[in-house]
Amino acid sequence: MKPFLFLVLICLTSCVDKKELPPVDEQLVRVMVDLHVAEGAASNLTSRMRDTLLPAYYQQVFEIHHMEEAVWEQKIKELEKDPDLLQQL
C-alpha cells in the first residue's frame, strides 16, 4: 500500500501547474555575452585606460547588435523584476 501511495503522491506533484516563462530573448543573450567579453578585455587595462575604453566597447556592442543603450537598460530593469526569467537566461 505504501508504494502505491508514494506513486500517487509523485504523480500529483508532477501535475502541478508551473509558471510559464516567455521565450528567451536571443538578442538580449548575445548582447549580454558580448558585454561580458568587452569587460573581460578591459579588465587587463589600467584603470585610466579602462575608464576611457569601456564605454567605447559598450557602444560598439550596441551598434553591432543594432540596439540602443536605453532599450538595453529597460530590458535589464524588466529582468530585475522577474528573477525566474533572469535565471532562465
Image (tube, helix red, strand yellow):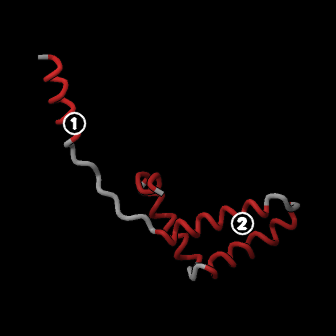
Residue 49 lies, in percent from the top left, at: 86, 67
Image x and y of residue 78, in percent: 45, 64
Query: Going by the image, does 18 lie left or right of 66?
Result: left
Residue appearing at x 44%, y 52% in the figure: 83
Lower position in the chain sequence, tag 2 or tag 1: 1
* Position of residue 32 measured from the top left corner of the image (x, y, whole percent): 59, 65
Q: Residue furthest top?
A: 1
Q: Which disc number belongs to residue 38?
A: 2
Q: Quadrant of residue 69?
A: bottom right
x 62%, y 77%: residue: 62
Residue, disc 1: 13
Residue toward you, 70 or 42: 42
* Quadrant assignment, res 56: bottom right
Is 2 placed above or below 9 here?
above
- Residue 33, x across and y down, in percent: 61, 64
Q: Are marks 2 and 1 in contact (CB under 8 Å)?
A: no
- Residue type indicated by callout 1: Thr
- Under circle 2, the secondary element is helix
Callout 2, which amino acid? Ala
What residue sits 66% from the left and 61% below the top?
36
Residue 76 as seen in the image, left or right of residue 46:
left
Distance from Cα at disc 2 to Cα at disc 1? 44 Å
| Above or below, 14 relative to 68 | above
Q: Helix, strand, or loop for circle 1?
A: helix
| Residue placed most toward the observer, 57 or 3 | 3
Whether residue 71 is situated above or below residue 2 in the rendered picture: below
